Amino acid sequence: MGADYIEQDLQLTKDGVLVAMHDDTLDRTAEAPPGVPKRFCSGPVIKRTLEQIKMCDVGSWFNEAYPQYASEDYVGLKIPTLEEVFQRYGTSVNYYIETKNPEAAPGMEEELLRLMEKYDLIEPAAKDWQVLIQSFSAASLQKIHALEPSLPLIQLHSSTETSESIRAQLDLVLTYAVGMGPSKTDVDAALVEAAHARCLDVHPYTVNETVEMEALRSLGVDGMFTNFPDRLEGVLGKDAAGGKTGASLAAEASKACRGS
Ligand code: CA
């Protein structure tokens, strides 16, 4: 579908395993199949072991919520670990990884860096932005920056903020990040200009409508989070450099802007 990056939201299990999971809790998307205790598939991820979580069906809810996209293949799907994602895609894709709920899961950052090291992703992340790490938590990003200063980080900003309140934070953000991810409704010309004046890239979330994509492109954003990469590719056109090439060009431009 033309996506330059695939996104993983991270949660940590009780026994210290990183899994790719959006919500802090299992309640919305996990179901216990017959014979599996219901409590294994409900409550906070951080209170469950990987063994318990692996018993849950996380595909059936999607078929019920989105019948237009339903598929039999989704029934019985399991929550993947980050390591399984790395094993499946290796260095063939770009990853955009979010540390979620890091306050409740100390050690998440160290485990992420350990896995990136194991799968040879530290150097391509630093050099070509093959991995971008995003978080709403400045503390989580600052911790990663202290552990591995070469990694490109993206500071997310809550939709409760405004262009003005985000602009007031950019001088701090640029001490540890290469870019920022605002809610699409907070993006205006002043925000893009202030970010670019500091060599910070702007990646708004979550942009699903073609008209929004076109408007944000006109404002000069550098990338977008979307559930519909094919729509964005249609807006950008086939000439736009994507995938690994696009990521490494962005990395190069960022470094040139910073003079490093
Ligand atoms: Ca996310």
Image (spheres, helix red, strand yellow):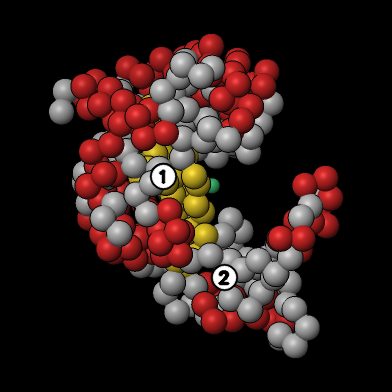
What whole-number distance in Å separates the C-alpha atoms at marks 1 and 2?
Answer: 27 Å
Question: Which image quadrant: the C terminus?
Answer: top left
Of 139 and 235, the residue lying toward us = 235
> Which amino acid type corresponds to the residue marked 2 in the rendered image?
Val
For image coordinates 39% across by 39% down, the residue present is: 154
Q: Earlier in the sequence, mark 1 or mark 2?
A: 2
User: Does mark 1's beta carbon lie closer than 8 Å to ligand 1?
Assistant: no
Of 188 and 62, the residue lying toward us = 62
Question: Which image quadrant: the N terminus?
Answer: top right
Q: Could you say where residue 29 lies in the image, as x and y percent from the top left?
A: 70, 62
Instruction: Give the mark toward the camera: 1 or 2.
Output: 1
For image coordinates 61% across by 30% down, the residue present is: 230
Q: Which residue, given by chain and number where applicable, does mark 2 sit on?
A: 45
57 relative position to 143: left or right: right
> Which amino acid type corresponds to the residue marked 1 in the rendered image?
Val
For image coordinates 22% across by 55% down, the residue present is: 147
The secondary element bearing badge 2 is classed as helix
For image coordinates 44% across by 72% down, the residue present is: 17
Q: Could you say where residue 231 lies in the image, as x and y percent from the top left?
A: 63, 27
Q: Which residue, given by chain and number where applicable, does mark 1 sit on?
A: 93
Mark 2 neighbour density, 10 Å: few (under 14) some (14–19) many (20 or more): many
> Which dot marks residue 121?
none
The answer to whether any part of residue 28 appears in the image is: no
